[in-house]
Amino acid sequence: MNKFKNLGLSDDLILLLSELGYKEPTKIQSLSIPLALMGRDILGCAQTGTGKTASFVLPIIEILNNQKSKARMPRSLILTPTRELAEQISIYFKKILKNNKLNFCLLIGGTALTDQDKLLNKGVDILIATPGRLIDHINRGNILFNDLKILVIDEADRMLDMGFIPDIDQISENLPKIRQTLFFSATLNKEILNIGKRFVINPKLIEVSPPSSTSNTIDQYIIKCNNKNKLNTLENILSNIETKNTVIFCNRKKDIGSLYTALKRRNISSIMFHGDLIQSKRQEALREFKNGNNKILIASDVAGRGIDIENISHVINFDVPINPEDYVHRIGRTGRAGKKGTAITFVLKKDTKYLQEIEKLIKMKIKIFNINLEEKKIQDYEFDTLYESNQIPNFLKR
Ligand code: ADP
Ligand code: MG
């Protein structure tokens, strides 16, 4: 018997899921869908790429089915930290709602307010929004939340951190107190759960694996290097390792531009993706990357959360992230849905403390990268000494 059936989902949805190639539910889906269908609040924590999206999308559809929303009165709201994640979730709804009367609306910044307003006026069942744009609509009186049944906060720890919490509080003031609330993330620590308390009622905490653990489908490495040889090392990796799509993360937006130019000078073409680009450029960048026109995306942490792109075989942290949770999310762009991936983090001497924080969070020591690029096999190699002496190992040379 189809294991989705045991979760209480309807036959129509199950048929659709099999068309999507979902043979059986993932762990987080098995644990959270039945509880969500019962109306429970959920704090769901499961590793990156393990199907948290369907864990809230499917119950929303079941719960809202057979009724229609009134004008300006959505019945569910999904909040995400980035426009691209919101858009991705809306595309997921589009696929799953193809034979269904329920409708959705994407409310994200950088797009026209008036089109969104027209849709809201017609009546929308599911709103998928980033906080800033949602607040714009609330302030304009475009939305009434009296009928809201379900609130989802995806990437919940990011949404409850200092940057977003004032927005979330403001939005929450407009929502009915009696509603169902679902939180999901791959990293939910005690402090965040504490902050989250005020948004939920008697929630069920679901932790599939240790919080903030990284998926074992991702091979993780560090490369110790210095400022002088960092770029050469990257160039060598990009030119010698067989990759499909690669995301390179930098900590600062201005470094994305410098790295883009430096790689271009070395005849390596890439795409930039960060929050200072206008929305059409952001969309174009992701589109080019997704369709394989360009295989290298240099990104800020805007691309770190939730983005699900097939064929990302490698994530390279050109800078060690300052916030250890960001490491988990960045490398989680690869090794998704059971596929294999590789993550390589460049570590300068001054980054040692950040690396230690990451290793403490994920509760493992990250291996030193020692793949022989010529023979493509693992070999003992003393990177540390080589790199400290500012030389490039032979096998990293072209
Ligand atoms: P998460 O939010 O946990 O990081 P996503 O919801 O983005 O993960 O899902 C990761 C990928 O796994 C997506 O491409 C999704 O279509 C796929 N997926 C989710 N659930 C299943 C399933 N039950 N069977 C097969 N693939 C699935
Ligand atoms: Mg997700």
Image: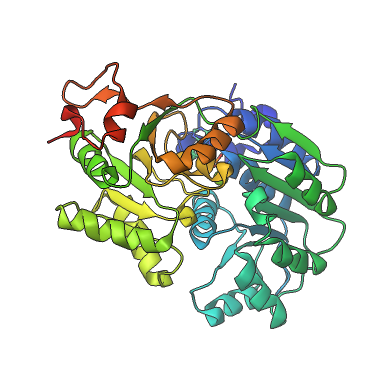
In this picture, is 322 found above or below 172? above
Ligand 2 shown in quarter: top right
Q: Nearer the viewer, residue 321 or 337?
A: 321
The residue at the far left in this view is 398
Left or right: residue 30 compared with residue 196 = left
Q: Residue at x 36, y 46 (%)?
A: 247
Q: Residue at x 49, y 46 (%)?
A: 321
The part of the image, by quadrant, that contains residue 207 is: top right
Q: Quadrant of the N terminus?
A: top right
**Residue 240 horizontal/vertical position (percent):** 19, 35
Residue 169 appears in view: yes
Q: How many marks?
A: 0
The part of the image, by quadrant, that contains residue 279 is: bottom left
Left or right: residue 144 compared with residue 124 = right
The residue at the far front in this view is 389
In this picture, is 228 found above or below 110? above
**Residue 391 horizontal/vertical position (percent):** 21, 35
Q: Please, which colouring scheme is shown?
A: rainbow
Left or right: residue 359 compared with residue 207 = left
**Residue 388 horizontal/vertical position (percent):** 31, 34
Q: Residue at x 84, y 53 (%)?
A: 198
Left or right: residue 88 compared with residue 210 = left
Residue 333 appears in view: no
In this picture, is 119 found above or below 387? below
Q: Nearer the viewer, residue 2 or 198?
A: 198
Q: Quadrant of the C terminus?
A: top left
Q: Nearer the viewer, residue 67 or 214?
A: 214
**Residue 61 horizontal/vertical position (percent):** 65, 49
